[in-house]
Amino acid sequence: MDPTRFVARHVVNLPRSGIRDFFEVVSKMQDVISLGIGEPDFDTPWHIREAAIYALEKGKTHYTSNLGLIELRRAINRYVEKNFGISYRPEEEILVTVGVSEALDIAFRALVNPGDKVMFHQPCYVSYHPSITLTHGEAVPVPTYAKDNFALTAEALAAAWQPDSKLLMLNLPCNPTGGTCDQRQIEAIAKFCVEKDLVVLSDEIYSELTYEGGHTSIARLPGMKERTVFLHGFSKAFAMTGWRIGYACGPATLIEAMMKVHQYSMMCASIISQEAAIEALLRGEDGMKAMREQYQRRRDFIVRRFNEIGLKCHLPRGSFYAFPCVEKTGLKETDFAMGLLQAEHVAMVPGTAFGANGTGFCRACFATGYDQLIEAADRIERHVQKLAAKR
Amino acid sequence: MNPLIKLLLEGGGLSTAQMAQVLNLSEAEVNRQLDQLKKDRLLLGWRPVLNLAEEEAGVVRAVIEVRITPERGGGFNRLAERISRFDEVESCYLMSGGYDLLVFVNGSSLQKVAGFVSEKLSTLEGVLSTATHFLLRTYKEQGFLLDVKVAENDRLKITP
């Protein structure tokens, strides 16, 4: 008999990740230039790795406080205050988690009642919608558009809003679009959230990778700190994706609620990753800035090339993703991505893996070497020209 | 800082054609800028970073601490330039601390290097003393790690 009957209904109905299917095809091919990797190509800077090794040598192998090492929470408070202008008490307003992924998961589980309406802008990171489903919430997508460079606008938010909406999920700068909001736009969103009494989960994992115009966290705007869970981590800015370490900051009541879930499901984040994170916050800023500069040069190059090739691409103000439009080829994004992969061995993720508003787009990650980017751009150009010749 | 210099500093060994692509310039313009950098003595030249330790006809390298008498009206410069002109001298730096010049010397054998120090360097007027240290083993050269194994690129090809 089929064991599927043992699987919970809402999990059976959870759609398979579009990324995973694409990954299955790519992993079987040789010599692929992948622009589909959602992480930096840098290894974690040595001084951070060395701090973890030293921690192991000192015998740091035991459980930590559920909330995380107090030294780390203090360092997080200083870092967030300095770079985001918001102050959180280390004793009760900061929680160290196993990546921002865990922070998101426990935030949803702590805040969403079955049937609660959760708004999120899309195209978006693959986890948000499934996370809402897994906590039996009702997903309310808010579209973002190329004409706005995929910024979230208060107008789109208001248009999508439904009565009894409870939570707004924000990811600025955004994976996959690279879109983010300027000061004026984020202020308008904040006003809307206060007006409609929304609680906000703000995933700011790419915030250090903002190239022009600066980044404003919604949590520092009037009326927002008491209703926002600020989520951040180390994966992108400090190249620590595999370490699985992140944090949530927010009002003590919300952090305490998340703590209740965290203490039973996770106990604490890895002590080694926490020790490494302290080193990153204390001495990692110069290295982070050097990486950001390098990403910016790569961004300028690849976006220019996409536009030269005829795949209209906005200049992303943040993250390390470009989001070119492939409609000019006459193909659906999935067909274009698969065709490009098979003909030229270049992998870009179809935009629909990130939501319905990704139709017509593909995501290209430019966190890779120049020689890969130059070669990939040439191959994409050849492929697009061949498609045009056929038509 | 000039974008071209920033790109050069990033390393990566890009050809001028690749640099031209990244900077959105013609190759001719990149070459022109490189020539200008050379004229301005910001770019001094190109050297490959070689690891010749395994080569039979290898190179013996030494680091020499040199104490010299500063001269009225010239300081250390005249003598330092005179020392630097020797072909055996790869690098020459004025240092703070217990000695004045740090001189990196290459020779085809220990005797050749020792001979250079005793016949050419120590004998110069103004050189008070030398302390010669012979290089035994290189772990890192100009930013390149030697014996550390380069990790295989085992990153997943697609991740969200």
Image (cartoon, rainbow, N blue to C red):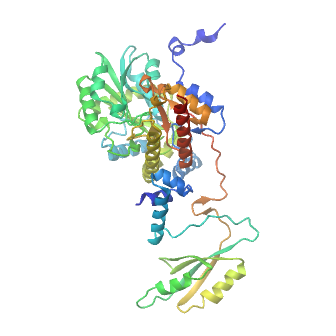
Q: Nearer the viewer, residue A296 or A199?
A: A296
Q: Position of residue A255 (x, y in %)?
A: 37, 30
Tell which of A330 and A87 is nearer to you: A330
Task: Report the residue that reaches farthest toward the top.
Answer: A1
Q: Spot the residue most to the right.
A: B56
The answer, for residue A68, to whether it is visible in the render is no
| Label total for image | 0
Q: With A53 as the anchor, is B33 left or right in this view?
A: left
Whether residue A161 is visible, yes or no, is yes
Above or below residue A132? Residue B28 is below
Q: Is residue A41 above or below residue A120?
A: below
Looking at the picture, does residue A8 appear above or below residue A62? Answer: above
Q: Position of residue A378 (x, y in %)?
A: 54, 43
Residue that lies at the very extreme toward the bottom in this rendered image: B125
Left or right of A44? Residue B113 is: right
Looking at the rendered image, the quarter that the N terminus of chain A falls into is: top right
Residue B82, x across and y down, in percent: 53, 86
Report x, y in % for residue A172. Answer: 37, 35
